[in-house]
Each structure stands twice: as C-alpha cells, then as structure tokens.
Amino acid sequence: MLYFDDDAELDDKLFIRRLLDTYDQDDTIVGVGGIAKGLHSSRAGKLLGILTFQMSPSLGKLSLSSLAGSLLRWSEAAEIFDTEFFHGCNMSFRKEALRDMKPYPWMTSYAVADDLYMCQLASRYGKLVINPGLTIIHHESPSSRDKAGKVAKATAINHYYFLALKKAGAIQYGALLWTLSYLMLKETLRRNFSAADGYKQGVLFILNPRKQKYNEYLGQPVQQ
C-alpha cells in the first residue's frame, strides 16, 4: 500500500521500481518511506529542535515528545536507514503489516500524526526503512489561520494518545508539555493567536486528570 498526499508529485520515473527493489533487499522490511525534496534544517534549527523536543539527534527516531521533526534532516542521508516513522506524504507498507489498524475515536478533528500511528502498528511485524532515493515534490499549501487553532489542538491531543498507546512514561509526557508550551509561545510571538490558543487548549487537556475518556479503548483502568 502506497500513500501520497494529493499535493505530492513524483519526480522520478523509476520511483516504483526503486521502491520494490528496497522491499526485495530484506524480507523483514514491512514499510518503506521516502523524502520530500526541499526540506532541510540549519545547524541552529537542529539545536533548537532538539532542545524543544521537536527533533531527535537520530535521523530515524521520534523525539522524546514523539514529534517527527527529524524528517527535516533526511536529505542529509546517503544510504537507506532504519526508522520509527515516515513522512505521511511519501510512505508505503506491506498490506499485512496494517492488519491491526482500526478507527481511533479521539481523531474526530484533524488526523495529525496518523502516519505515526500507522508506523507504530506496522513495526510490530517487521522493520521500517527510509530510502532517501525515493523523492517527491510536495506542493504544500500555506496554512490557513482560521484552522490553525483546530490543527494545534489536534496536534496536542493526538500526540498525547499516541504516547498513551505506546505506554510512555512521565518523562515523555513532560517532554510533550514542554514542546507544546514552546509552540504556544512561538505562535504568540508571531501573533498567530488562533494557533497559540489551540496549543493552550491542548496543554490544558493533557493536564486535566479527568480527561481520559478513552482509557478502556487503550486497555487501561478508567479514571473516575
């Protein structure tokens, strides 16, 4: 199964051939991802990304707060490497690796981080790799400020439940709060108050001890 965004464009006529060749290299590979051309991060950007837990020092690792900012550095890679996650606009899986996929009841707004959930499920059955030779051009539209608040709140909630599915520890939840607080401050300074308020609502959601209405779904005791 191959996934592209509707604003993605292939720039390599041999893309499918390269993709199939990557799977053929190792029978344990259950997912192969590529990169979007043009993404990069400066040295200062990498340091800030790591300090705010948006990036991991490792190319193929999610940050401590489970964000996927490290994909900004994938253009640095020259060889195929193992990964925990894909860029949702350029990813593929063996069909059987997603046999456990089902609707997530908290994704009632924007499906932010849906690619992370898919990767987490698929990784139970084998390994995921990034082939930096599988490139696309991603024609991303400018973000709409009137929807920025909803996207920001969904970012907080969906990453919170992603950590819950992974049975993360307190340090990872603390890292997510730190990341969201930074993003809230950043958007406030940019006067994007809708996004800042969305992150604020997300932080309040995470801090609310009575919020966990989906604990039964996650196989955890229900909080009263």
Image (cartoon, helix red, strand yellow):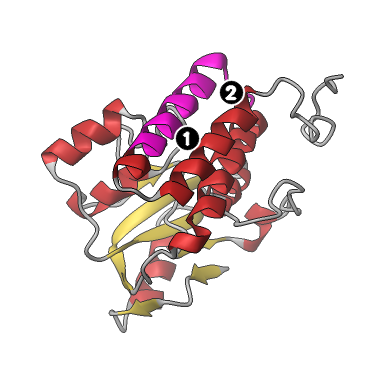
Numbered badge on residue 128: none
Q: What amino acid is at disc 2? A: Ala
Report x, y in % for residue 149. 52, 51
23 w.r.t. 215: above or below: below
Quadrant of the rendering where the N terminus is positioned = bottom right
Residue shown at 44% from the left, 42% from the top: 196
41 relative to 33 in the view: left or right: left
Of residues 103 and 151, the one nearer the viewer is: 151
Distance from disc 2 to disc 1, alpha carbons, whole Å, reads 10 Å
Residue shown at 21% from the left, 37% from the top: 46
Q: Is residue 183 magenta?
A: yes
184 w.r.t. 195: above or below: above
Q: Is residue 4 visible?
A: yes
What span is in magenta? 166-185
Question: Element under label 1?
Answer: loop
The reply to whether the C-beta atoms of the residues labelled 2 and 1 are less than 8 Å apart is yes
Question: Element under label 2?
Answer: loop
Q: Main secondary structure of the magenta part?
A: helix
| Residue to which mark 2 is pinned | 168
33 w.r.t. 162: above or below: below
Q: Is residue 76 magenta?
A: no
Numbered badge on residue 66: 1
Residue shown at 48% from the left, 55% from the top: 148
The crowding category of the residue bearing disc 2, from other C-alpha atoms within 10 Å (few below 14, some 14 to 19, many at least 20), is some
Query: Which quadrant of the figure has residue 169?
Result: top right
206 relative to 188 in the view: left or right: right
Report x, y in % for residue 198. 53, 44
Q: What amino acid is at disc 1? A: Ser
Q: Is residue 57 visible?
A: no
